[in-house]
């Protein structure tokens, strides 16, 4: 975890098995020098923990929430229903359907509960970090500079 100012991203994933993919998100956040915290909390198995993390995120200084979820992929939508912060959903390949079930679950949120949705798997985990940096970069020149550096390197760290 990289500490810099009060910028924060909350990264949640529904299962320990999601950590290997979501680690790519962590690495990109670190490259942008954005402080983050990461938790495993399932919308189905740990609803109280998810509610506590999501509903109290803004008060803890969180600015963007990234949620990785597979199969039914309820986590991003549950989080979006509990906070006014932007939520980015990362569909994960955790079923025989190759992550397409998660993609459709995340992208089909009801009106008023938006979740930005990125690609399935590790590309999506990386893009979620870039999107979070772009959101934070709207008000932070240092992060904007890191985004410029990222683009000048051909979108790679």
Image (tube, helix red, strand yellow):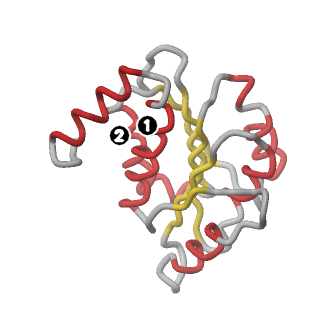
Q: Which residue is mark 1?
A: 133
CA distance separating discs 1 and 2: 13 Å
Can you say whether 34 is above or below 111 in the image? above
Single out the mark in the foreground, 1 or 2. 1
Q: Residue furthest bottom?
A: 96
Residue at 41% across / 55% down in the picture? 20
Residue 115 in picture, x, y percent from top left: 64, 57
Q: Which residue is mark 2?
A: 27
Q: Is residue 46 left or right of residue 26?
A: right
Residue at 73% across / 50% down in the picture? 79
**Residue 22, numbered label:** none
Residue 73 in picture, x, y percent from top left: 65, 67
Residue 19 in picture, x, y percent from top left: 48, 52
Q: Quadrant of residue 3?
A: top left
Q: Residues within 10 Å of mark 1 (few under 14, many from 20)?
A: many
Element under label 1?
helix
Q: Residue furthest front?
A: 138
Instruction: Tell which of 20 and 68 is nearer to you.
Output: 68
Residue at 77% across / 31% down in the picture? 56
Q: Quadrant of residue 63?
A: top right
Q: Earlier in the sequence, mark 1 or mark 2?
A: 2
Q: Quadrant of residue 4?
A: top left
Element under label 2?
helix
Can you say whether 5 is above or below 65 in the image? above
Circles 1, 2 touching at the beta carbon (< 8 Å):
no
Residue at 48% across / 61% down in the picture? 118
Q: Residue furthest top?
A: 5
Q: How many marks?
A: 2
């Amino acid at each position: 975890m990289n500490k810099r100012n009060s910028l924060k991203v909350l990264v949640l994933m529904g299962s320990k098995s999601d950590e290997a993919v979501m680690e790519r998100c962590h690495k990109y956040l670190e490259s942008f020098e954005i402080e983050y915290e990461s938790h495993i909390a399932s919308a189905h198995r740990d609803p109280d923990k998810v509610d506590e993390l999501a509903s109290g995120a803004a008060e803890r200084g969180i600015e963007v929430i990234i949620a990785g979820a597979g199969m039914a992929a309820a986590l991003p939508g549950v989080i979006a229903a509990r906070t006014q912060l932007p939520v980015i959903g990362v569909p994960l390949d955790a079923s025989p359907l190759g992550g397409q079930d998660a993609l459709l679950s995340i992208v089909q949120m009801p009106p008023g509960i938006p979740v930005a949705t990125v690609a399935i798997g590790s590309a999506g985990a990386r893009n979620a970090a870039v999107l979070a940096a772009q959101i934070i970069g709207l008000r932070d020149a240092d992060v904007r500079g890191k985004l410029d550096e990222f683009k000048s390197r051909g979108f790679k760290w």
